[in-house]
Image: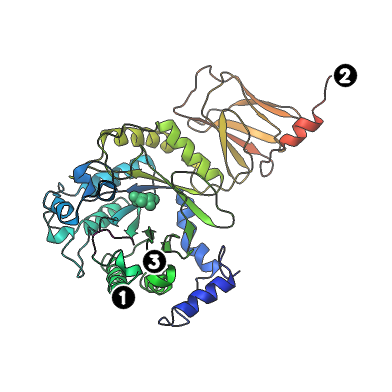
Amino acid sequence: MIHPGFSRRQYLKLVSAAPAASALAMQPTSEADRERRMKWWHEARFGMFIHWGLYSVLGRHEWAMEQEGIPVAEYEKLATQFKPKPTPAKEWAALAKKAGMKYMVMTTKHHEGFCHFNTSTTKYCAPKTAAGRDLVKEYVDAVRAEGLRVGFYFSLMDWHHPDGARCVKDEQARRRFVDYVHTQARELMTNYGKIDVLWYDVPWPLTAEGWESEKMNAMVRKLQPDIIMNNRSKVPEDFDTPEQRIEASKGRNWEACMTMNDSWGYHKADDNWKSPKACVRNLLTCARQGGNYLLNIGPTADGSIPPESVKILTAVGAWTAKNGAAVYGTDPCSVSRSNYMSFTRKGNTLFANVHFWPGSEVAIGGLRSKVLSAKLLATGAPVKFEQEEFRVKFTGLPVNAPDSPITTIAVECDGEPKQDMNRVREERPRLQA
Ligand code: GLC
């Protein structure tokens, strides 16, 4: 394997399909280099996604232009109404920090084609329209000021550019459009200092060869040697991006991106909000399987964060502030079975994260490691325990959950915590007939 999930044959096919790039520049990054670049990201576990664009003026989801068939000339006029308040990104970054998020990924350009950054390629961008300033620069400064890592979302699909659809059938259109996109990628990678994540989206309608993705990504890596890239330029690159679901990729790095209601962009009527508990559970589910959780906000046109999102993330942050050890820098955890808790692990410590508090006793079946000690992670208060062959019980706990929305018990074991439920089923002594 030259790259996980990417066979030598596929790789050679791509290389031969893009003769413009030099063989050296086309070398996929080595596994060791990937691990070096991704170390911070694995430890981070939790990031903020931000979907913000002209669709935020409409407040009917970021796909309104396409789903409602809005003509380009009509949609473009939204740029005259897109006048954000001063530095909303400071509020986003402060909230991300408070929530316990370690990095942020903002839409620099979504499918609508409007660029938040200053670009030589089009006037359809924030600095040259009503906003009157470079919103990507403002974002980068705000994120850095909070000590968080900076990510750029960048849509390849473009509903505004005249060549954005016909590029698939017309070689001259493709040439123009690919040059347009590559120039923008170059600008993003050149004009804002160090960028930590490049998050491509929707490579419709071209193939990797059509986009010249290998060449584009080699250029990105040359300009930003430490950057990590997702898999949506039709090249696997550094990490997979399961969307609106948590699904670990085998042998690949992965990050589940999810919304807090049902929309990425601001949708004023979408009231299907997740609870803080659901968000923390999702974070733990990702962490248990070695993945990351990228949780979205959809600010309004002026950049304000919907109050529901502030409320949810504030509650999540109150939890991560006390229980971060169960999330950050954790290792994959093979213990998984319970009806009321989810597990994470760091070394020999098992974190039993109880989301449905059962009362004064909490029990884990099939644990194959010896428990040495246990405590409530949030307060450090010791927890009594009794270990039998097929069960460990944590006892003398309060009837009501001591922490919210999830109570974490840190369980120190004599080795890597392992669970064997088959053994419980097969070996637990049965009644004599
Ligand atoms: C989908 C949607 C898009 C959103 C993205 C986030 O690709 O088209 O609106 O930005 O998911 O992963």
Whether residue 245 appears in this view of the structure is: yes
Q: Does the residue labelled 1 lie within 8 Å of ligand 1?
A: no
Residue 402 vertical placement versus 245 (above, below)? above
Q: What stretch is highlighted in magenta?
A: 156-161
Which mark is in front, 3 or 2? 3
Kindly identify the amino acid type of the residue bearing the numbered disc 3: Leu
Task: Quote the CA–CA distance across marks 3 and 2.
Answer: 67 Å
Residue 412 vertical placement versus 229 (above, below)? above
Kindly identify the amino acid type of the residue bearing the numbered disc 1: Arg
Which residue is the site of mark 3?
Answer: 206
Which residue is the site of mark 2?
Answer: 432
Q: Does the magenta stretch include residue 128?
A: no
Give the number of the disc on residue 175.
Answer: 1
**At which x and y percent is residue 363?**
64, 26
Closer-to-camera residue (28/168): 168
Mark 3 lies on a secondary structure that is loop
**At which x and y percent is residue 45?**
46, 48
